[in-house]
Image (cartoon, rainbow, N blue to C red):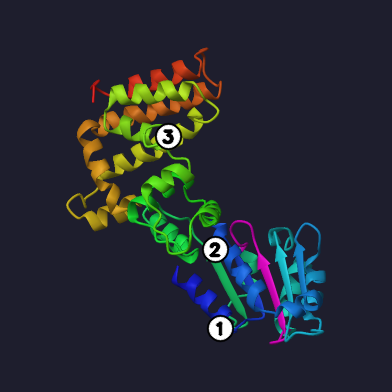
């Protein structure tokens, strides 16, 4: 994410380009760049005169360009921010308006286009190889990147976050960094800046129970703790809306797909390379090593098939009238190869 940080540093230091094209698979980063532009491109007293925030569903590309090319009234530049820009550039005329903007824009003009998802190739081509454009397209976040990014977000909010706390938050939020930021804002309501956010705090304020959450059930299953898995499943069965089986299945599926890759990896004795290959934090490799002793490659293939069948039944696409509890218990019973009482 060095380019992301470099873009933010340039904006904060007052160095702007006439055009920003922002998007990608992780929307958090594009939104943060847009926020930085809104904060630093104009002084507060000029925003009422020289700032327009538009939406691609409500404006044409040509209109946005004309606004951005207008001479500023009070500030140093005219700033136009377009959100949901994926709706703008569907015709040749709209792309020509973008090219027209680049031909005429100067230091007094700033147009920001934020796309939800990937940036269209034709837009990138129209803005290619010019110093007038800052183009940022984020990629998907991998599991091994997530704890570090969460630490960065909490550090920006003024908190210290131990690694275990970051891992617990990663389990709770997944790769939704916007949700992570909301969590950090929530902690700011309860704790002073400089506070270390301990695992106990995460458990209480993010709502993670050490025993009763989807990730603890996953852990019990992949380590063969049959009795514990059944105990957690019984709690889930009392509140299926809070613990949907269709949220558990992808979590298990993702783990067992990576466990299959673990079995076939030539880097089993190189933790750094193995973690990179699996796309996980090295901290989690011990769980994969333990699971590999319990689930060989043949068994992993069987588990993936069980998960697929359970997913179809949960969606009502396969015969059978099993309710939530029976479906969950049956899945656990079929997956764990030998029943332990741990």
Instruction: Single out the mark in the foreground, 2 or 1.
Output: 1
State the extent of the magenta-drawn residues as a range: 105-120
**In the structure shown, which secondary structural element does the residue marked by tag 1 occupy?**
loop
In which image quadrant can residue 253 be found?
Answer: top left
Q: Which labelled disc corresponds to residue 213?
A: 3
**In the structure shown, which secondary structural element does the residue marked by tag 2 occupy?**
helix
Q: Residues within 10 Å of mark 1 (few under 14, many from 20)?
A: few
Q: How many marks?
A: 3
Q: CA distance from mark 3 to mark 2?
A: 29 Å
Res. 50 visible in picture: yes
Residue 8: x percent and y percent?
A: 54, 74
- Tell me if residue 34 is in the magenta stretch: no
Towards the viewer: 100 or 280? 280
Residue at screen point 36% across, 54% down:
144
Q: CA distance from mark 3 to mark 1?
A: 44 Å
Q: Which labelled disc corresponds to residue 85?
A: none
State whether residue 84 is above or below residue 108. Answer: above
Quarter of the image with the N terminus in it: bottom left
Marked residue nearer the N-terminal end (3 or 1):
1
Marked residue nearer the N-terminal end (3 or 2):
2
Q: Which labelled disc corresponds to residue 29?
A: 2
- Tell me if residue 106 is in the magenta stretch: yes
Residue at screen point 31% across, 31% down:
220
Q: CA distance from mark 2 to mark 1?
A: 18 Å
Quarter of the image with the C terminus in it: top left
Residue placed under numbered mark 1 in the picture: 13
Residue 313: x percent and y percent?
A: 50, 21
Q: Residues within 10 Å of mark 2 (few under 14, many from 20)?
A: many
- Determine contact: label 3, label 2, CB under 8 Å: no
């Amino acid at each position: 994410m060095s380019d992301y940080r470099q873009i933010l540093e340039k904006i904060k230091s007052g160095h702007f380009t006439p055009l920003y094209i922002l998007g990608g698979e992780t929307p958090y980063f594009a939104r943060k760049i847009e926020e930085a532009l809104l904060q630093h491109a104009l002084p507060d007293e000029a925003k009422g005169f020289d700032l327009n925030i538009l939406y691609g569903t409500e404006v044409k590309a040509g209109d946005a360009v004309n606004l951005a090319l207008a001479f500023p009234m009070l500030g140093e530049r005219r700033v136009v921010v377009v959100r949901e820009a994926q709706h703008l550039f569907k015709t040749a005329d709209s792309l020509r308006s973008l090219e027209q903007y680049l031909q005429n824009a100067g230091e007094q003009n700033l147009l920001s286009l934020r796309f939800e998802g990937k940036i269209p190739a034709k837009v990138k081509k129209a803005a290619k190889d010019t110093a007038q454009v800052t183009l940022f397209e984020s990629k998907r976040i991998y599991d091994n990147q997530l704890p570090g990014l969460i630490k960065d977000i909490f550090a920006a909010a003024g908190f210290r976050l131990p690694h275990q706390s970051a891992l617990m938050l990663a389990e709770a939020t997944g790769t939704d960094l916007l949700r992570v930021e909301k969590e950090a804002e929530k902690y700011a309501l309860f704790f002073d800046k400089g506070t270390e956010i301990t695992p106990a705090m995460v458990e209480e304020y993010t709502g993670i129970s050490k025993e009763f959450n989807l990730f603890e059930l996953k852990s019990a299953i992949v380590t063969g703790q049959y009795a514990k898995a059944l105990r957690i499943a019984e709690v889930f069965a009392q509140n299926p809306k809070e613990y949907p089986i269709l949220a558990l299945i992808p979590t298990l599926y993702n783990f067992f797909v990576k466990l299959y890759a673990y079995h076939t990896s030539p880097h089993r004795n190189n933790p750094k390379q193995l973690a990179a290959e699996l796309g996980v934090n090295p901290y989690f490799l011990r769980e994969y090593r333990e699971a590999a002793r319990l689930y060989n490659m043949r068994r992993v293939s069987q588990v993936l098939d069980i998960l697929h069948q359970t997913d179809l039944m949960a969606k009502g696409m396969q015969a059978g009238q099993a309710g939530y509890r029976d479906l969950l218990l049956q899945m656990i019973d079929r997956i764990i190869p030998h029943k332990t009482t741990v």
